[in-house]
Image: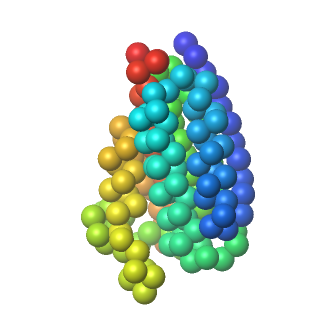
Amino acid sequence: MYNNMMKIEFLSKSENESFARVAVAAFVSQLDPTIEELTDVKTAVSEAVTNSIIHGYQNREEIIKIEAVIEEKELIITICDDGIGIENIELARQPLYTSRPDLERSGMGFTVMETFMDKLEVYSEKNKGTRIVMKKKFKSLS
């Protein structure tokens, strides 16, 4: 079966959110995705990276890591930060919940990720960071 992998690291600057989105999209393009599939992945990556910047690092410049793996019939994207972590993952995954109401954020990041990907896993430990794992199957791999 088709297998490939890529890793990138970048500073948690808001301007790097678009870099992350485009880098993952370029990697995914080898799967010949539909426009909808590509847009889904780009949107989910954008939300995860934005969460790391705003919530994980609270706009401090630290490192965000992304790994994308094509494994058999599935794309697996892992996004990690070493930020403040999520105290209550279940609460954070609720639509409209935000840990930063002072920024007037919508609180829809996890909901968007869940909507556009087939599976979303969130692992976090307070003051140790967060790891988001998103999975998606592509029609071209079916």
Q: How is the image coloured?
A: rainbow
Q: Residue at x 49, y 27 (%)?
A: 33
Q: Nearer the viewer, residue 14 or 59?
A: 14
The quarter in which the C terminus is drawn is top left
Q: Would residue 78 be visible to someone looking at this image?
A: yes
Name the residue rendered at 55%, 23% in the picture: 31
Q: Considering depth in this image, is 34 or 76 the residue closer to the camera?
A: 34
Furthest-front residue in this view:
35
Taking 93 as reference, is 34 above or below it?
Answer: above
Could you say where residue 20 lies in the image, as x and y percent from the top left?
63, 51
Looking at the rendering, which quadrant does residue 57 occupy? Answer: bottom right
82 left or right, relative to 86: right
Which residue is painted at 58% across and 16% down in the image?
Answer: 2
89 sits to left or right of 134: left
Is residue 127 visible to the viewer in this orientation of the structure? no
- Residue at 71% of width from left, 63% of height from top? 11
- Residue lying furthest bottom in this view? 102
User: Which quadrant of the figure has residue 128?
Assistant: bottom right
| Residue 6 in picture, x, y percent from top left | 68, 36
Furthest-left residue in this view: 95
Residue 130: % across, % down: 52, 61
Quadrant into which the N terminus falls: top right
Reply above or below: 42 against 109.
above
Image vertical order of residue 13 relative to residue 35, above or below:
below
Query: How many numbered discs, if any?
Result: 0
The x, y position of residue 123, in whole percent, is: 45, 56
User: On the image, which quarter does residue 22 sit in?
Assistant: top right
